[in-house]
Image (cartoon, helix red, strand yellow):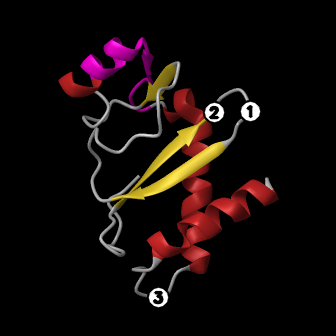
Amino acid sequence: MGPFPISNGYSYILLAVDYVSRWVEARATRTNDAKAIFGVPKALISDQGTYFCNRAISSLLEKYGVVHRIAIPYHPQTNDQAEVFNREIKKILLKMVNPNKKDWSRLLDDALWAHKTAY
């Protein structure tokens, strides 16, 4: 997600959802490129963003045997768990951040905890 107002050098949030357990993890990242990862999943479901659909990611996924499923454009329900969480985390962060919205990266772990304990 992003870009957001720069917060401690971070502009993006990388989100990972385990589709079986629905466990969600999120990390603040400086960029939206392939260098920020969580580990090797069995499958990756993404939108058609260039940060997921590029030669570097394709090679990496092939190397580790990861199946890449791409959500249909203009149909975010295909990627619904991630899209729902995106809305929820944004809503939680908006309630927590200062008016200048530049402290969101410091509050991301708290927002994630709030989401995990409330839903």
Placement of 12 over or under 70, stated as above or below = below
Q: Which of marks 3 and 1 is nearer the N terminus?
A: 1
Q: Do the residues labelled 3 and 1 touch (CB within 8 Å)?
A: no
Placement of 57 over or under 69, stated as above or below = below
> Is label 1 in a helix, a strand or a loop?
loop
What residue sits right under mark 1 in the picture? 21
Specify the quadrant of the image occupied by residue 96.
bottom right
Q: Which amino acid does label 2 sit on?
A: Asp
Q: Which amino acid does label 1 sit on?
A: Ser
Q: In this view, does 13 lie to the left or right of 26?
A: left
| Image coordinates for residue 66, horizontal then vertical, percent | 44, 16
Q: Nearer the viewer, residue 66 or 5?
A: 66
Q: What residue type is labelled 3?
A: Pro
Q: Is residue 67 visible?
A: yes
> Is label 3 in a helix, a strand or a loop?
loop
Specify the quadrant of the image occupied by residue 74.
top left
Measure the alpha-carbon separation of dots 3 and 2: 33 Å
Q: Do the residues labelled 3 and 2 touch (CB within 8 Å)?
A: no
| Image coordinates for residue 42, horizontal then vertical, percent | 53, 18
Residue name at image x 79 percent, y 52 percent: 119
Give the mark toward the camera: 3 or 2.
2
What residue sits right under mark 2 in the picture? 18
Say few, some or many: other residues with alpha carbon within 10 Å of mark 3 (under 14 / 14 to 19 / 20 or more).
Answer: few
What residue sits right under mark 3 in the picture? 99
